[in-house]
Amino acid sequence: MIKFLNIFKQDKYIRKSIIKDINKIINKNNFILGKEVFNFENSFAKFCNSRYAIGCANGTDALTIALKILNLPKNSEVIIPAMTYCSTAFSVINAGLKPILVDLEKNRPTLSIDEIKKKITKKTKVIMPVHLYGSVVNINKIKKIIGNKKIFIVDDCSQAHGAKLGSKRVGSLSDISCFSLYPGKNLGAYGDAGIITTNNKNLYNKAKNFRNLGSDKKFIHTQIGFNSRLDTIQAVVLNHKLKNLEKYNKKRIGIAKFYDNNITNDKIEKLIYSKGSVYHQYVILVKNRIKLEKLLKINKIQYGFHYPQSINKIDCLKNKFNKKKFKNAEEIASKCLSLPIDPMLNIREIKRIITVLNSF
Ligand SMILES: Cc1ncc(COP(=O)(O)O)c(C=O)c1O
């Protein structure tokens, strides 16, 4: 079986040290906001070249907290892509704001900058680009469109740990950046976790306070916050795994280039990823997806879908976007299939995947 993801194998050489350090936490009885959380926040901020980082419980909370601390008028508009994980849209709605969808650029996983321009109104308060599949949105172009309007950029970096726009790292590009650290991400914990980065001291203080029930000091609550702290045990895991992130991102990039050059079947469309992409997913488009799924199953190759529905077609959201069409996002949803891109795949496995795809 060629696995879609093999976290066990990725962590083989750091597992013992992780368990040893978790043991220390248990011995110390120090489970909430321990030193390891602050160490990880500092290391992650440094990694992203950002001034501040605030750990939290998961990526969905990271996005929701980022929006809540902006204190925007109810129903302010937040521009998001029509193809992303449901959390991006849910965070907007849970923060009492209104998601406005824009389509993706043709053949790319990221939102169309021209479409953003068309959707900006007086009510637009946030643009929330998603670096989907690890492909980086050109935030500089969005900044140009915004000009001196008071619109924040909060980017969803959940699939782009370590990705770059020019020489700058994702996590340092926007007013606030939000990351999921879900186990399967390029940087993942051993359970749910998330982190926010920012260069703005005021937003940092607000987010840090918000994730801890609005409290900096015991029993003093200055905001109606969330209980959304990063677990100390998860911070231990993440501190170890951060050391492998760049090495594994390079492997992902290598595998992606190999797929790009060697998948030659006309029935398979490839997407165009940004230059500094870290290939969280390698997504191909096929018309007859069911037939390809059968072939992959017979050949014992695992695969995924990211995602089988665009945001406007998700059950609990579709009535909000009635009759609106998002051609490129809907096309990806109907044709997408994610190939294994685990950094531990070996060349024999990669070649086998390519042979099977080219025989389709
Ligand atoms: C693009 C995107 N946004 C948000 C999330 C939500 O993160 P989490 O599952 O940690 O809440 C994820 C991951 O699941 C994601 O891929």
Image (tube, rainbow, N blue to C red):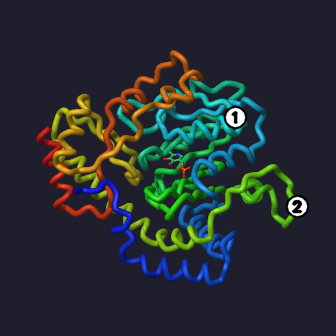
Quadrant where the N terminus lies?
A: bottom left
Which of the pair 31/178 is nearer the observer? 31
Q: Is residue 55 visible?
A: yes
**Up-down relation of residue 354 to residue 122 (above or below):** below
Give the image quarter of residue 78.
top right
Between disc 2 and disc 1, whose residue precedes? 1
Q: Amino acid at mark 2?
A: Ile
Q: Is the distance from the Cβ of mark 1 to the nearest ligand 1 atom less than 8 Å?
A: no
Separation (CA) of disc 2 from disc 1: 30 Å
Task: Say which residue appears at 59% left-offset and 40% top-offset.
Answer: 128
From the top left corner, tell me how far across and down residue 161 is, in percent. 48, 57
Quadrant where the C terminus lies?
A: top left
Mark 2 packing: few (<14 Cα in 10 Å), some, or many (20+)? few
Q: Is residue 176 left or right of residue 212?
A: left
Name the residue carrying label 2: 220
Q: Is residue 309 left or right of residue 77?
A: left
Label 2 or label 1, whichever lies nearer to me, is 2
As helix, strand or loop, the secondary structure at mark 2 comes to strand
Which of the pair 225/31 is nearer the observer? 31
Name the residue carrying label 1: 125
CB contact under 8 Å: marks 2 and 1: no
Q: Amino acid at mark 1?
A: Lys
